Image (cartoon, grey):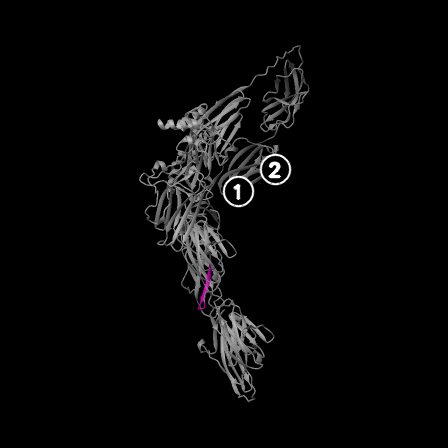
Amino acid sequence: MPEAKKPAAKTDKAAAAPADKEGSECRDELPDDETVPGGQSELTGLFVERPESTTVIKGKNVTFVAKVDSSDLLRKPNMKWLKGKWLDLGSKAGKHVQFKEAYDRNSKVYTYEMSIIKVVEGDAGGYRCEVTSKDKCDSCTFEVTVEAVQEEQPANILDAFKRSGDAGEDAGDLDFSALLKKREKKARDEPKEDVDVWEILKDAKPCDYEKIAFDYGITDLRGLLKRLKKMKKVEPKKSDAFLKKLEQCYSVDKGKRTQMHVELHDPNVQVKWLKNGVEIKPSAKYVFECVGNKRTLTINKCNLSDDAAYECVVGEEKSFTEVFVKEPPVTITKLLDDVHVVVGEKVEFECEVSEEGANVKWMKDGVELTKDGKIRIKKDGKKHTLVINEATIEDIGMYYVYTNGGESKGELEVEAKELEVLQSIADLSVKACEQAMFKCEVSDEKVVGKWFKDGVEVKPGNRIKMSHIGRIHKLTIDDVKPQDEGNYTFVPEGYALSLSAKLNFIEIKIEYVPRQDPPKIHLDTSSTGSKNTIVVVAGNKLRLDVEITGEPVPTVCWMKGDTVISEAEGRVRVETRTTLSSFVIEGAERPDEGQYSIIVTNPAGEDRAELTVKIVDVPNPPENVRCMGVGEDTATITWDPPKFDGGAPIKGYLMERKKQGSSRWTKLNFEVFESTTYEAKKMIEGVFYEMRVFAVNGIGISQPSGNSKPFMPIAPTSEPTRLTVEDVTDSTCALKWRPPERVGAGGVDGYIIEWCKEGEDNWVAANKEPVDKNTYRVKGLPTGEKLLFRVVAMNIAGRSPPCTMKQSVTIREIMEYPKIRLPRQLRTKFIRKVGEKINLVIPFQGKPRPVVNWLKDGEPLENKSVGIRTSDFDTILFIRSAERDHSGTYTLSVQIDNMQDKADIHIQIVDKPGPPINVMVTDVWGFNAALEWKPPKDTGNTDITGYTIQKADKKTQGWFTVYEHNRRPSCTASDLVMGNEYSFRVFSENICGLSDEVAFSKNTAIIGKTDLEYNKPAFKERDMSSSPKFTAPLVDRVVVAGYSTAISCAVRAYPKAKIVWMKNKMIIGEDPKFLMQNNQGVLTLNIRKPSQFDGGKYSCKAINDLGEDEVECRLEVRVLKEKKEGDEEKK
């Protein structure tokens, strides 16, 4: 630990405070009632030893030590070192500030050290250390005082400049001993007041330094000047630009806003803001404000990247500061849980922290865990997970997760797998040339193992075979020999388990005559419920052990029908021992069902037994699921039973439904439904549904049936409305009605019309197929009868209620006089151009149906290009392409017997006119020419509305219009050019336009030259230069935040002026938020989605060589009250 000065216990605050005033601005002063510990104070709380206040020389190192007793703590305490009240020094750890931590297991004391390397004046101030552990907390304060480096000075300043040596104070090159001795004696005889020579030297002029040194006996003048230069206090230089500089440092919480202020001498001067030496551009994050001589930099939503050094630059002067962004500690909100797994299983430790995206550290036994093939670390928002694949015994231990604000731990316990032995191997005693088979069965099918004989691994060969089927392991030795005798062991891999048995070899030396007993089958099937019948659920295992007796050992043969079942290994196999024969079916299937027989034989006889194996399974799915009818919110579903019931009776059915296009099925019943017809309820009208059905028997539930065709629950429409009679004849009646008021999701497929005689109830359908229209003529009605009519709407749900006429209708023809209803546009001359279509629809009335006849100019209409179509109530005349010969008077007549009505239609087909005739220049005088012509022979079948006259000179041959719509066949062309010769052309014009052909003048007009001479005045170019002047100023505006706006003004200047836009007297740079435009002197500043920070004073300055001009306005940005209230509610 470096040398440091410790102040006395009675040191006052003024002595403890640092001499640097600027450094004191960055720390919080201690309260008046809080004393700084100067020595070992009484220990209280968690601290065993507290850090002490210290005075340290600038440039030296200093270390503070704090000790905490953890004997009463359940978890490791958390230590924080703070400067002032807010600055967490943990975020500043590095070369300058270093931390160290140690733990003594015997005394259970944690030792925390904080070292400050090369102390600077900014390190002076009050410090605090806090220790927390769950609900316990303790803190202590201490202070650091930094002193400047000073050489030790003697009590008498004169002694510093006397020569040293063996001869005393007079040794050296300069010998003033006699004089100094006399002065010393005189000084002793006559005591003087103590004089501070350094104060005299500080206030004196440099030219007086030599005289003062001589007066006070200072011989080393050069040393004096060096010491005086070191001791002189440099007075702070007053700034020419800043009235008030930036504070030495600023503190802000992460996500909050901070502001930095400076005050300037000149309110009009421009400032620059720098961050780490890089200029800051104004944006939504960095907002510049200028109010008078005050400049403000606002930083919104501070993050760790804003923790930097900032400068405010005015000309050549700068003001420095530093911003500290305080990041809140990340705490663990959900602690780790202990985990207990079996070897090979996956392990997951999961915790949650207080902030999304935070970094955590996973550790085990003091070693940080990282991602590898076995360990994965997942991060999902606030959730952090440590995954260990296939846990092993080595993974047992305590796992820790650390954040900068807390920690948690969880213990992992891994238990070895236990393997259950279902059938162990048994000792065997076999004779020569017989077969020996060791067999065992374990609980895990995936377990593999090895066979050993007397500790030596058994290898397969011609006589020795090893097999592994499912959970059964076999070792078979054929043609046993004496050397095969020994201890045999099966060892499963990965388990501390072994199964052993002994093979005994029996050597028969005595020949004997064996006893002969006829074979006997001892078959017991009483547990199956029926004699010699075995029921097996499909997929299960069947093992039938049959005991066999007889001497010698009988031969066993299993047969299914006429097929012999071999003893080979497989799904269906036979296992034979001396007195036991086993019939095994692995995973029973439906083809395994049938009659089986077992036959045993030996020299003494034969025995036979029959048995039946029945395989039962879940039933097949139901078939042909269909919808039989629908209602407003119901549907009736029916289906066919499954073809195969699985060998067990069907108990009932389960139904599910879903919307078409969805994948989510909804159960309709939880109890088994026995019928094959079901009414589904609570459905939504107009939505397509699909259904499926499951069959249930005693074994289980079948696979689902196929989906039914989509169906829609709908209801019939309401009855049609406003049924009325439109027309009646001797055998027909035309009806008209309105659609139903309520149609529903099924829509309307059509209408059925029915009639019956008055007083009867025998309704007869007038149409077999529904009609789409809302009108219908009922035919084949009895003449003179009184009939009632009704209409029914049809859709997929069926018939709607009928709409019935309240009064009967008598079927009888009604007489009506013929009358033509001529449209208004045909009552005057009907004019069309050549090539246009003509389609004239003329309605008429009359009963019975009148006879329609067309004439043109009093003669029958026989022109094939004119088409006529006539219906019961109107007639149509149409011409696909009109020609001029189609013009004329068309007469339409409608007649019933001797009653008749006529109407004349005048049709005129027009075309463009021909050219005028005989265009002549009749007279020329001065700069004028008179023209005359005759009207065209072909007027286009209409009147000429005017003429268009054009002229052309012989030099350019370019045609220019002289007159348009000239009504007379003559005109005068004026303003002709002297010396030119002109020709003319004339177009005719009618309602179709100008004529396609043109008439040229037969002669020309020559404008002769005169003796006039024109003296052209000298041209004097006008001086257009002018200084900038705004012709339209900027206008104050109030805008709504979030909506783009623009401010505009207009300027006039020549040469073109340079335009500068400013906000609060600060030039707007290339900020993407602002778009500056200049269109022919109209200046526009577009502001994209302004916020409240964009408000202020905007100005526009125009500058050129002749001068400058400036206009300004104020922009106020307001926030909608609704938006503010919404933000407050969110907060």
Q: Amino acid at mark 1?
A: Ser
Task: Evaluate whether residue 207 shows in this view.
Answer: yes
Asked whether the residues under the numbered discs 1 and 2 touch, taking CB atoms below 8 Å apart as contact, a structural biologist would say no
Q: Is residue 199 above or below residue 901?
A: above
Q: Quadrant of residue 605?
A: bottom right
Q: Quadrant of residue 206?
A: top left
- Assess whether residue 1033 is covered by the magenta stretch: no
10 Å neighbourhood of mark 1: few (<14), some, or many (≥20)?
few
Task: Give x and y (percent) for residue 121.
Answer: 42, 37
The residue at which mark 1 appears reads as 871
1003, 387: nearer the viewer = 387
> Which element is circle 1 on?
loop
Percent x, y for residue 101?
A: 42, 49
Q: Which mark is residue 34?
A: none
Q: Earlier in the sequence, mark 1 or mark 2?
A: 2
Query: Is 551 situated above or below 397?
Result: below
Between 1012 and 1022, the one lying in front of the other is: 1022
Q: Is residue 979 left or right of residue 620?
A: right
Q: Position of residue 648 (x, y in %)?
A: 46, 70
Determine crowd level at label 2: few under 14, some 14-19, many 20+ residues with C-alpha closer than 10 A: few
Given residues 886 and 750, the one toward you in this image is 750
Q: Quadrant of the C terminus?
A: top left
Name the mark on residue 863: 2
Quadrant containing the N terminus is top left
Report the magenta residues as a range.
691-699
